Image: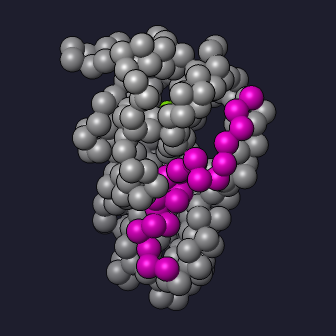
């Protein structure tokens, strides 16, 4: 039987870890492609531009197109009216996503939205700029809530930590665009007719995202989460998840 529906594949902790491909992930993608299973790489990483992500995939041995990549940066931009104005506290990926929607990035004056994503150039001045715009009525959008991110030197502050600073300073909670948010779900649904599986390494983001979409979820143990709650389908890594699923079709 021909398998039906697309696979939504998380990147960090599923396809690669600290930039190194996880054993068997490249072959697993090839196997899905050989069965004509549509794929979408869905990441909460808002830092890279689409081309940077495609190049990372290619370096890992995976050829993909821009249509096969969905990021929290794109989800954040999708919440702002096209041709609007936004204060942007974020690096490349968010800036690119805003430009794709003809949204003007402004430093002061009226803004429809404040978007906070991954950045290494956060300061008192950018905090003040973002908080002031939110207090003036701009929609406050965060790309993703991750408080930290793992590096070879240990845990470093994540985007969620930067967003929390703006929340405290503005007295307003952010709307999160990335997984498991509604914006990401809408973006994914607009690209695909049917979804067969969400695969990810974090129940709180990837598992909750599958719940929102109403589709199956497989937790892979090659990333952040190392224990499996009762009732959650799991596999040691992507290649196992793919072969189990194909065998059951
Ligand atoms: Mg992950």
Q: Which residue of the protein is positioned furthest toward the left in this rendering?
A: 230
Image quadrant containing the N terminus: top left
Name the residue: 73% across, 48% down: 52
Image quadrant containing the C terminus: top left
In the image, taking residue 121 as reference, residue 220 lies left or right, namely: left
Which stretch did the figure color magenta? 61-82
From the top left corner, tell me how far across and down residue 137 is, in percent.
35, 81
Nearer to us in this view, 78 or 158? 78
Residue 20 drawn in magenta: no
In the image, taking residue 135 as reference, residue 150 lies left or right, namely: right
Question: Residue 204 lies in what quarter of the image?
Answer: top left
Q: Which residue of the protein is positioned furthest toward the front in this rendering?
A: 1
Taking the image as drawn, is residue 134 in sight? Answer: no
Name the residue: 31% across, 65% down: 172
In the image, taking residue 87 as reference, residue 55 lies left or right, namely: right
Name the residue: 45% across, 67% down: 78
Name the residue: 52% across, 39% down: 39
Nearer to us in this view, 211 or 134? 211
Taking the image as drawn, is residue 1 in sight? Answer: yes
Q: In the rendered image of this protein, does residue 14 appear above or below residue 70?
A: above
Residue 73 drawn in magenta: yes
Q: Which color mode does the image show?
A: one colour
From the top left corner, tell me how far across and down residue 152 is, in percent.
67, 23
């Amino acid at each position: 039987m021909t398998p039906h529906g697309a696979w939504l594949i998380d990147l960090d902790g599923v396809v690669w870890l600290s930039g190194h491909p996880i054993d068997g992930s490249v072959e697993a993608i090839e196997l899905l492609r050989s069965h004509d299973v549509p794929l979408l790489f869905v990441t909460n990483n808002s830092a890279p531009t689409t081309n940077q992500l495609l190049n990372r995939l290619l370096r890992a041995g995976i050829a993909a197109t821009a249509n096969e990549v969905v990021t929290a940066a794109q989800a954040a931009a999708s919440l702002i009216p096209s041709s609007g104005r936004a204060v942007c506290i974020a690096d490349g990926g968010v800036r690119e996503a805003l430009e794709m929607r003809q949204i003007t990035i402004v430093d002061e004056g009226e803004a429809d939205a404040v978007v906070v994503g991954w950045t290494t150039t956060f300061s008192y001045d950018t905090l003040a700029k973002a908080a002031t715009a939110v207090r003036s009525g701009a929609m406050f959008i965060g790309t993703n809530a991750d408080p930290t991110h793992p590096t070879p030197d240990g845990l470093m502050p994540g985007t969620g930590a930067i967003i929390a600073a703006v929340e405290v300073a503005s007295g307003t909670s952010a709307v999160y665009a990335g997984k498991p948010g509604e914006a990401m779900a809408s973006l994914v649904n607009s690209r695909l007719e049917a979804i067969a599986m969400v695969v990810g390494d974090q129940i709180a983001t990837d598992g909750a995202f599958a719940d929102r979409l109403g589709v199956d979820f497989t937790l892979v143990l090659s990333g952040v989460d190392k224990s499996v709650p009762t009732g959650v389908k799991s596999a040691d890594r992507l290649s196992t998840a793919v072969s189990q699923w194909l065998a059951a079709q």
